[in-house]
Image (tube, grey):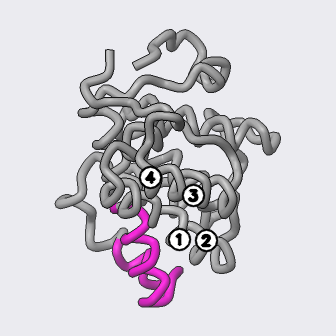
Amino acid sequence: MTFLPITSHDALEPDARAASDRQVELHGGAITTTKATLLSHLPSFTTYMQWYTLRDELVPFIGERAVSLFSYAISDENDCLVCSVFFRRILIDNGEDPDNPQVTETEQLLIDWGRLIASAPGRIPLAFYAKLEAAFSPQLRVMLLAFAGQTVATNLFNTVGRVPLDEFLYGYRKPGDERSS
């Protein structure tokens, strides 16, 4: 059971309804339970939807696949059901195996960094930082880390808020994972 309110589109205030419609228009998809929960407080919704702005800024530099792999690594390591399954769906729908992806050296670096950000943010080895500095420009490192921070924040919101998994994502859970919240 969710800890936070999930607001239906019909129950939204006019400004929140407009923000919801704009989100779908700009980024497609549907208003997920996460977004419906955030829409109960428009400034929170607006803040969290900046994740899409950061994603759109990263895609030209590293590609959509790398963004999805990075996001999945962070969310999976955080054990955020909603976000990890959301990114599993993107990967699976694009023909990827999220449990055994065939990746480039740069994608592997992003996966490893994403997992370290989620599991040991204060203990990332200096040698790993050197690899990141060799692979990514200073501006791109800022963008990647800001994006990772937004992803972690979304993981936290969903996990602590006990936001339930959207039913359309059930089939994308890891084998044997029957959780729905």
Q: Residue 126 colored magenta?
A: no
Name the quadrant containing residue 128. Answer: bottom left
Counting residues from the start of the chain, the first of labels 3 and 4 encountered is 4
Counting residues from the start of the chain, the first of labels 2 and 4 encountered is 4
Find residue 175 and report its horizontal and vertical position in percent. Answer: 60, 15
Residue carrying label 1: 53
Image position of 28 with respect to 59: above or below: above
Residue toward you, 52 or 114: 52
Give the distance between the C-alpha atoms of the residues marked 3 and 1, in whole angstroms: 24 Å
The furthest residue to the front: 14
Q: Say few, some or many: other residues with alpha carbon within 10 Å of mark 1 (under 14 / 14 to 19 / 20 or more).
A: few
Q: Say few, some or many: other residues with alpha carbon within 10 Å of mark 4 (under 14 / 14 to 19 / 20 or more).
A: many
Residue carrying label 2: 56
Q: Are marks 3 and 1 in contact (CB under 8 Å)?
A: no
Name the quadrant containing residue 144. Answer: bottom left
Residue carrying label 3: 108
**Element on which disc 1 rests:** helix
- Disc number placed over residue 16 in the picture, else none: 4
**Element on which disc 4 rests:** helix
- Disc number placed over residue 6 in the picture, else none: none
Give the residue type at disc 2: Asp
Eye-nearest disc, 2 or 4: 4
Counting residues from the start of the chain, the first of labels 4 and 1 encountered is 4
- Please give left or right for residue 90 compared with residue 70 in the image: right
Q: Are marks 3 and 2 in contact (CB under 8 Å)?
A: no
Q: Say few, some or many: other residues with alpha carbon within 10 Å of mark 3 (under 14 / 14 to 19 / 20 or more).
A: some
Q: Are marks 2 and 1 in contact (CB under 8 Å)?
A: yes
Give the distance between the C-alpha atoms of the residues marked 3 and 2, in whole angstroms: 21 Å
Q: Are marks 4 and 1 in contact (CB under 8 Å)?
A: no
Q: Residue 132 colored magenta?
A: yes
Where's the N terminus, which quadrant?
top left
What range is drawn magenta here?
129-149
